[in-house]
């Protein structure tokens, strides 16, 4: 089950997402369904187009399956999806 505490270790494809902040101002406001993911990019199906958004430097607002709304710093997502799922996340002390 996806929770705000373990979002970094789960599959993101299929989640509703929106770009809240980005170092690229043209990407702010892009919203839709995550269609694909690479090491450095999230591909969001927005309207009738696929739009690639760089993870690093962006903050995403994501809707979890239980309708919880969370903010995710894209730099914690920078990794190959299959490796990110198995890596350990250190909690801040």
Image (spheres, helix red, strand yellow):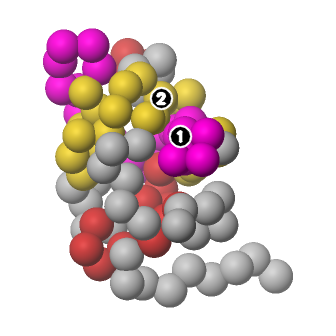
Judge the density around disc 2: few (<14), some (14-19), many (≥20) Cα neighbours within 10 Å: many
Counting from the top left corner in percent of width and height, residue 41 is at 27, 47
Q: Considering only order in the chain, which callout, 1 or 2, is on the residue closer to the N terminus?
A: 2
Counting from the top left corner in percent of width and height, residue 83 is at 29, 78
The answer to which of 11 and 83 lies nearer the viewer is 11
Looking at the rendered structure, the secondary structure element under dot 1 is strand
Most extreme residue toward the right is 93
The residue that mark 2 highlights is: 18
Residue at the image point whose x is 42% and y is 66% from the top: 10
Judge the density around disc 1: few (<14), some (14-19), many (≥20) Cα neighbours within 10 Å: many
Q: Which of the image's four quarters has the C terminus?
A: bottom right
Drawn side of residue 40 relative to residue 10, left or right: left
Q: Which mark is residue 81?
A: none
The residue that mark 1 highlights is: 62
- Looking at the rendering, the stretch of residues picked out in magenta corresponds to 46-67
Drawn side of residue 33 relative to residue 2, left or right: left
Residue at the image point whose x is 54% and y is 47% from the top: 64
Q: Is residue 51 visible?
A: yes
Please tell me in which quadrant of the rendered image residue 16 appears: top left
Q: Are marks 2 and 1 in contact (CB under 8 Å)?
A: yes
Looking at the rendered structure, the secondary structure element under dot 2 is strand
């Amino acid at each position: 089950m996806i929770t705000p505490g373990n979002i970094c270790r789960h599959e993101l494809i299929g989640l509703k997402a929106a770009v809240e902040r980005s170092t690229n101002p043209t990407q702010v406001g892009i919203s839709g369904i995550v269609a694909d993911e690479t090491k450095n990019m999230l591909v969001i199906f927005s309207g009738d187009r696929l739009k690639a958004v760089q993870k690093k430097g962006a903050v995403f607002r994501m809707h979890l399956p239980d309708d919880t709304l969370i903010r995710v710093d894209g730099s914690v997502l920078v990794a190959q999806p299959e490796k990110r799922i198995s890596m350990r996340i250190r909690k801040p002390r």
